[in-house]
Image (cartoon, rainbow, N blue to C red):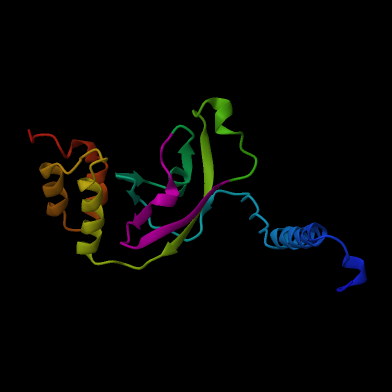
């Protein structure tokens, strides 16, 4: 006979031993590769100080928030997803939302059928202070989005194009629902 004395026998036994070793190695790699989840945040807030009011841009929507409390409080039934938004603060700084996690100790929104408010810890990255035309382009992209309230309505587009600064943009967005209506 040839080969190792402990491995004598049929080829099926050798394949079985190789398969067991392969499965053992794969199991070890899967355990070693597992990432420990980040701890649930204890308090709501934003990772960087923002100048309020702020404008949430994204998800075919433009939403004004007047304080950190209103920015980090979201009704369970809301379709608002902070992770898919950028934030423009009153000072003209643009922030990318890199994370939004519900804080610890809150009941599931399912228990209140989505009517309760949940608080979030929001992590943002300052992407700088863009030129006004770049801010307008971001907003116009939302206005032109076919899923938005405005769905590319020319009156809404002209309304945004007529704005000249961040303060007037934020003020106008408080009544963005009216941008498609005929002027009185």
Q: Which residues are magenta?
A: 78-102
Hey, which residue is sitting farthest front in the picture?
Answer: 1
Please give the name of the residue rendered at 83% of the width and 60% of the height, measured from the top-left corner.
Answer: 10
Drawn side of residue 165 relative to residue 97, left or right: left
Q: Position of residue 149 (x, y in %)?
A: 24, 38
The location of residue 110, given as percent across then percent down, is 56, 29
Which quadrant of the figure contains the C terminus?
A: top left
Residue in the foreground of this view, choosing between 106 and 175: 106
Residue 112 within the segment the image draws in magenta: no
Can you say which quadrant of the picture contains the N terminus?
Answer: bottom right
At 51% across and 59% down in the image, what residue appears?
47
The x and y percentages for residue 125 are: 44, 63
Q: Is residue 183 above or below residue 24?
A: above
Task: Point out residue 152 in the picture as x, y percentages from the top left corner.
Answer: 17, 44
11 lies left or right of 97: right
Q: Front-most of 69 and 153? A: 153
Give me the residue at 59% from left, 45% from top.
103
Q: Is residue 21 left or right of residue 120?
A: right
Q: Nearer the viewer, residue 20 or 125?
A: 20
| Count of numbered labels shown in the rendering | 0
Up-down relation of residue 182 to residue 143 (above or below): above
- Is 134 rendered above or below residue 155? below
Image: 173 above or below 132: above
Q: Is residue 93 rendered magenta in the image?
A: yes
């Amino acid at each position: 006979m040839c080969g190792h004395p402990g491995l004598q026998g049929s080829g099926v036994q050798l394949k079985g031993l190789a398969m067991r070793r392969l499965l053992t190695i794969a199991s070890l790699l899967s355990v070693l590769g597992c990432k420990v989840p980040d701890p649930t945040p204890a308090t709501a807030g934003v990772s960087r100080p923002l100048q309020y009011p702020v404008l949430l841009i994204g998800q075919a929507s433009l939403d004004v928030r007047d304080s950190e409390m209103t920015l980090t409080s979201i009704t369970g039934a809301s379709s608002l997803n902070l992770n898919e938004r950028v934030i423009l603060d009153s000072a003209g700084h643009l922030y990318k939302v890199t994370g939004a996690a519900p804080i610890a100790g809150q009941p599931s929104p399912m228990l209140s059928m989505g009517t309760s408010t949940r608080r979030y810890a929001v992590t943002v990255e300052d992407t700088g202070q863009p030129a006004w035309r770049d801010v307008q382009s971001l907003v116009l992209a939302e206005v032109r989005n076919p899923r938005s309230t405005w769905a590319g309505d020319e009156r809404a587009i002209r309304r945004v194009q007529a704005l000249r600064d961040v303060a007037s943009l934020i003020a106008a967005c408080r009544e963005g629902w009216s941008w498609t209506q005929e002027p009185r």
